[in-house]
Image (cartoon, rainbow, N blue to C red):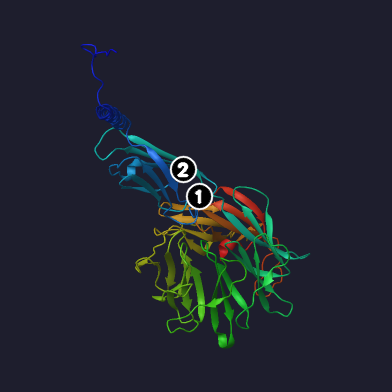
Amino acid sequence: MSSESPVAGAAESPPASARFTRLVLAIVAVLAVLVVGLGAANALRGPRVLDTVAGLGDATRLAGTTIEFRLNQPVADLDASAVRVDPATDATVSVDDRTVRVAFAAPLRPSQDYVVEVAGVRAVGGGPESALRHEFRTADEVLHVLQRRADGDDTVVRVATGGGEPEVVLAAPRIESFAHAGDVIAAIELLDDGANALRIAAAGQEGPPASLALPQSGDVRNLQASTTRPLLGFVQDGAGGFATLHVLDVADGVTATPQPVLGLDGSPMSVDDYAFVPGTSSLVVRDRDGAMFLVDAAGVRPSTPLGSHTELRGILPGTSTVVVADPDRGATIDLATGETSTLELPPADLPDGAYPGRVTSLDLAGAHLLNVLIFDGSDGGQASLVARADADGTSVVFAPAEGSAVLDHCLAPGGTLVAVETGAVGAPNDGYEDEPWVADTITTLVEVDTGRIVLSLAGGRSDWCG
């Protein structure tokens, strides 16, 4: 029996642990090369976008809409000149670590394509620049108008700025006024005995609207709606001229129960006027004595006094700034700070024989729309129009066709569009007792900045007039 000896000079196999160590070192070396390579690539390419978040829910109704670019690395601060928006729109830019945020200073136009670009974006440590870009289209704005008919039920009709046929969303025998909040339409119906009732219907509901059970007897008036929350409000007249404001939260549909707005003493207020604050669940209320309050619709937060003023004129479009009037001046109240400031309106440059009418404020600089009636002294004729006056001068926003007259104008919630109601000169009214109206009214939707006509349809008393 023989045995073999190892061949001289043959290398012994390394232990398994040594082979594993060499493998790990090789992998680490490869990963290090990859990391260096990726770092070099990033350094050569500059910051890149991982995700874009656009909060466009109320972009056409509120200022402050944001576009967020979320990047792969922290970036250096930017100034406002880095941002370009098409169509031209005022915007600011801010940086928070890996996020670049663009905020729009005013509500955006509905049914509009936008391009946002941010140039000169660099990593915190320097390096090449990147350019960020995002394209989007804003939602359609929806307009509701009232069509009164001598041969059938009155109807509330809905139409979108982006096109499409008008759609009937509520019908009732004699509608005085209506309001739209969330997916609900409410209307005040004039009854045969001269009293009125509040009807309510959900969008797409088949059959007649339901009657809302009222908390007390008395006529209903001043029906309004929030432009950004599912809230309705109405005033009900009671004994001794007491006018109670009720709020209805219709987030869950038409089954809500009206709740009275309470004063500082915990009892219902007697109200002269009110307005919902966009983007919140609050209202500004003026009582019968002229005192004004900021009121929480849910009644959770206590009311805040805002001083006494002769008139509540509304809220600047897309903001929480209230417009008021007193015998010596007009003013604004910033609800975020409580600060009151004088509102100076630039004088309108109007021709001889022109008489200004209703004024609607557009911004803190005093830009405003006004109805104008012009008399021709030579032949006794008259004309009417809607004008815009601001620091740059006076321009015509809309002039009706010959034989028609401007009846009213009402701003869209974002202030970029205006609904102008017109009727034939000398036309009779429709005979409604509390809310008489010129027969065969037409509503024309117009861009405030350009005067471009977006659409026209039969009817008036749009939901923007609330």
Secondary-structure class at tag 1:
loop
Horizontal side of residue 185 vs 127, given as left or right: right
Horizontal side of residue 235 vs 335, given as left or right: right
Residue beneath disc 2: 87
Residue flagged by tag 2: what amino acid is it? Pro
Distance, label 2 to label 1, CA atoms, is 10 Å
Residue flagged by tag 1: what amino acid is it? Arg
Disc on the earlier residue, 2 or 1: 2
Across and down, in percent, residue 52 comes to: 43, 44
Whether residue 57 is visible, yes or no, is: yes
Q: Residue shown at 59%/81% (left/top)?
A: 237
Judging depth in this view, the residue of 370 and 30 nearest the camera is: 30
Across and down, in percent, residue 245 comes to: 53, 77
Find out whether the residues at labels 2 and 1 contact each other: C-beta distance under 8 Å: yes
Judging depth in this view, the residue of 346 and 38 nearest the camera is: 38
Across and down, in percent, residue 145 comes to: 64, 60
Judging depth in this view, the residue of 61 and 37 nearest the camera is: 37
Residue 109, labelled with which disc? 1
